[in-house]
Image (cartoon, rainbow, N blue to C red):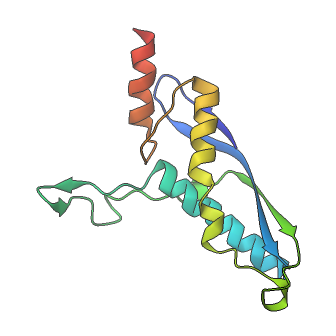
Amino acid sequence: MEVKVDRETGVIKLVRVASAHDVGKAINPMAVTGQIQGGIAMGLGYALFEGLQFEEGRVANASFADYKIATARDMPGATPMIVEKLYASEPYGAKGVGEMSIFGIAPAIANAIASLTGKRIKDLPMSAEKLFEQLKQTAK
């Protein structure tokens, strides 16, 4: 995971990501690659943008006008990697890849931010506002 951080605003931008997954036997490598790319996009949204806000027990951002999600413009250069190992206990030696490809994205982004800035954001989404506050505390 490679990120850029604007230290004056806290804005986090993904530059590049590589994501490797053991899929057993990739019966349709193009579809597997698509699943990994989709997982990267979903993980990116989960990590940096998506967050329900509540006011008096009600969802305050219940529409896409208020609930920010990742778009194609937010996607970094992505390198999906298929790792194949035949699993005799699975049909055709294949394993599922779908949601598995989401799991490592947020921790990888958090680690990249921490490596670059020395600041660790421990709750999602890792917004520009949260990072800006941490960066501002160091500047004092």
108 versus 44 height, above or below: above
- Residue 50 position, x and y percent, is 42, 56
Horizontal side of residue 66 vs 101, given as left or right: left
Q: Is residue 83 left or right of residue 56?
A: right
The number of numbered discs placed on residues in the rendered structure image is 0
Q: Position of residue 56 (x, y in %)?
A: 11, 56
Q: Quadrant of the C terminus?
A: top left
Q: Residue furthest front?
A: 89
Q: Is residue 114 left or right of residue 31?
A: left
Residue positioned most to the left:
56
34 relative to 119 in the view: left or right: right
Name the image quarter holding residue 66: bottom left
Between 140 and 4, the one lying in front of the other is: 140
Q: Residue furthest top?
A: 140
| Residue lying farthest to the bottom in this orientation | 91
Closer to the camera in the image, 38 or 65? 38
Q: Relative to the observer, which residue lies in front, 53 or 104?
A: 104
Note whether 26 is above or below 126 in the view shown: below
**x 54%, y 28%: residue:** 6
Q: The N terminus appears in which quarter of the rendering? A: top right
Q: Give x and y (percent) for residue 79.
A: 79, 56
Q: Quadrant of residue 3?
A: top right
Q: Position of residue 128 (x, y in %)?
A: 44, 36
The structure residue drawn at horizontal position 80% and vertical position 86%, both measured from the top left corner, is 89
